[in-house]
Amino acid sequence: MTGAFTALGAMVLGVLELLGGLAILAARIGRAVLAFQLDRRETVRAFYNVGVKSWAIVALTAMFTGAIMVIQAGQFVSKAQATSFVGWAAGFAVLAEIGPVLIGLMFSGRVGANNTAELGTMVVTEQVDALRALAIDPLVYLVVPRFLAMVCMLFLLTALGDVFALLGGGITSHILIDVPFRVFIAQVVEARLLDEYLLGLAKGSVFGASIAVVSCYYGLGVSGGAVGVGRAVNNAVVVAAIGIFFTDLMVGLAWSQLWGS
Amino acid sequence: MGAAAPEGAGGGPVISATGVVRRFGGVPVLDGVDLEVRRGELLGIVGPGGGGKTVLLKVLAGLLRPDGGEVVIDGASLAGLETDGRARLWERFGFLFQNYALFDFMTVGENVAFPLEQRRPRAPEDEIRARVATRLSEVDLPGTEALFPNELSGGMKKRVAMARATIADAEFLFYDDPTAGLDPVTSSKIFGLIARLHLPRGVSVVVSHDVDRMRAICRRFVMIDRGRVRFDGDLDAVHASDDEMVRTFFDESGLAL
Amino acid sequence: MGLLIAFRDALGLFFATWRWTFRGSLFRQRKVFLRQLHDIGNRSVLFITVTLGVLGVISVFQVLLQVERILPEFSVVGPAFIQTMVREFAPTITGLMIATRVGSGIAAELGSMVVTEQVDALRLCNADPVDYLVAPRFWACVLHTVLLTVYGGVVGVCCGAVVAHEVWEIPWTSFFSLRLVELSDAASGLMKATAYGMAIPIAAAQAGLETTGGSEGVGIATTRAVVNASFAVVVLDFLLSGLSFLLWFQGR
């Protein structure tokens, strides 16, 4: 019995420590961004790396996501004899919810995990210590550029991914549920999903920020050689996934408050 | 099971590598290595770090496939071996890996017993257990069977790995940097073990930077530098060598102690 | 291109895993198998609870915000939500989470074993890494993905029901209704869970066993495992959704 309580206590402390660490790192990043403290060359490189690494997998994922949503929505609307709703239903689900979440998860796997591995390797091979010894702040040199790149890129990738998702959805509806491509697109346009589109983009940038903070936190906290790097990447993607779902909920609630009033 | 093993030293080469090339990501790590080892030899391989010593050892053991050249062991080319033949060959090998390579999901006892348990036909359980206990006390770790590798210090792991590599009395014993990061006393013990476990009809190959301790047990040295054999011969040949680097390498290592 | 090569290698690994399974790998490696069962379950239950719970809350919330504009009453929301959960979100989101949690874990573990030469040592002792390392993880993952899908679905539906009840005052009995769930939905969900359960450990093990280099290599392998396993889930979802649509829906 005491064992269970000890374990529970340890878990609560662990979660609190994690949240505290993330908050401190986020605050330091925020201050540096506001003060415009960043290494310009590293920032350009980070933007390039992040974008090049992830756009293809994001576009592919988005296309499949759109297709899946059309199939799922198709089962409802064809049963209800309401195929005119398929554009709205699939478009709504993709733009407001599933698109940003799946793109975010994929981005976390590709860019976030990679970032943790990269920073972790730099820690293990003492490159971060070397930077400090040269009086270069790792936050300014390594973290802030990656943070900015991830926030901006996930915003752009969500915007791009949405297009691919609708493309995939349109093709699928054309082939599978007898709603021609052009009709599907017209339905999406008519459904006036601008609000949902913007909501999705807002989610994308917030996901980008949380993925960046989590992946940098775990990357810089690596210890214990190659095994440690693997473990850090594992933890980073898990916490980033939880972060995506929680911030999704938060942004959704905040949006509905703003929009409802 | 190959040709009948001739007793004692001498005879033809039992391991021979010709023109072995191995690249990683387009970069040649081994760049045409020729090497012959006879039965009964206890060979020392030395050379600067990153020169390809570990890769050479793994190519000779058939763990890495060469991109060019050929390795022949006991008359059979490694490249021509089917899965079965390779399995038969690997039963005659013992390998001490640089990073210990102890299975972290097994206890020390299970680790050391593992090569024996993989043998067909399998020895009775009691006999395996007895041999493990004997070998573990020979490396000064009696009664550690139930521990897990992550409960051991670096030197202890190395000695467990020694026990596992040698438990099956393999003909071909390869040691990849057996004393890296160990204190002098343990290092001397390990080199003593290597000399003691060397079979007169077998082959032992030691890769190490510890030239001083190698002098005591190895008769022949091979120096690998940038993927090639830079020197091959005994200590007299080292002193007679007109290659500045070879002489410095052996002298420097001698002076370091 | 890299994805295609990975796919080819993964396919080879998949068949090798079945081959070793038929040769009794699970019985011989029962200790590893049981430990994997314990580890994978232990590692994922809390994670699945949190993510699927939050998912249930968000989905019901978003859907009801829309539905209240176009429908007079909400009795269809619960059953339709449960149906979508069964055939789509429970398996797929659970799958993605397992790809993240378990997939990256398997890759990190196997990658570390490659880097510390344990895999070489296994081979030299004539022990096949697939037999010793992959097959037990594969079956533990298949079993857990199916079980956790069921569990995650229940968690998601319950959390959604709480939102529906507390915010929109939909009665419990009207929400918890299986009247829209058909056998085909359950079959589609189970089929997906099984397929994800097989694809994830294979994608992850393939990435892990191909680790090269030191600590950097393990990091790269872990990253690749997450991406490949998640992508496999998305593609399989598309294929299986399409298949079940053609099989069970269009025919009617």
Image (cartoon, coloured by chain):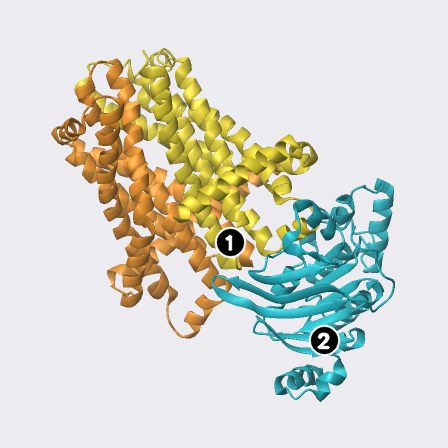
Chain colours: A orange, B cyan, C yellow
Q: Is residue A73 visible?
A: yes
Number of numbered tags placed on the structure image: 2
The x, y position of residue A2, in whole percent, is: 62, 37
Q: Is residue C102 left or right of residue C91?
A: right
Q: Nearer the viewer, residue A135 or B23?
A: B23
Q: Is A140 placed above or below C239 here?
A: below
Q: Quadrant of the C terminus of chain A?
A: top left
Q: Is C152 placed above or below C219 here?
A: above
The x, y position of residue C111, in whole percent, is: 55, 51
* The quarter of the displayed image where residue B200 is located: bottom right
Q: Residue at x 75, y 61 (%)?
A: B173
Mark 1 is on which residue type? Val
Q: Which residue is mark 2?
A: B221
Q: CA distance from mark 1 to mark 2?
A: 35 Å
* The quarter of the displayed image where residue B204 is located: bottom right
Q: Which residue is mark 1?
A: C218
Q: Nearer the viewer, residue C83 or B57?
A: B57
Residue C24 badge:
none
* The quarter of the displayed image where residue B139 is located: bottom right
Q: Is residue A160 left or right of residue C36?
A: left
Chain letter, disc 2 residue? B
The x, y position of residue A159, in whole percent, is: 22, 43
Q: Dot 1: what SS?
A: helix
Chain letter, disc 1 residue? C
Q: Is A216 placed above or below C137 here?
A: below
Q: Quadrant of the N terminus of chain A?
A: top right
Q: Nearer the viewer, residue A4 or A73?
A: A73
Mark 2 is on which residue type? Phe
The x, y position of residue B8, in whole percent, is: 87, 66
Q: Residue at x 63, y 86 (%)?
A: B243
Q: Is residue A16 visible?
A: no
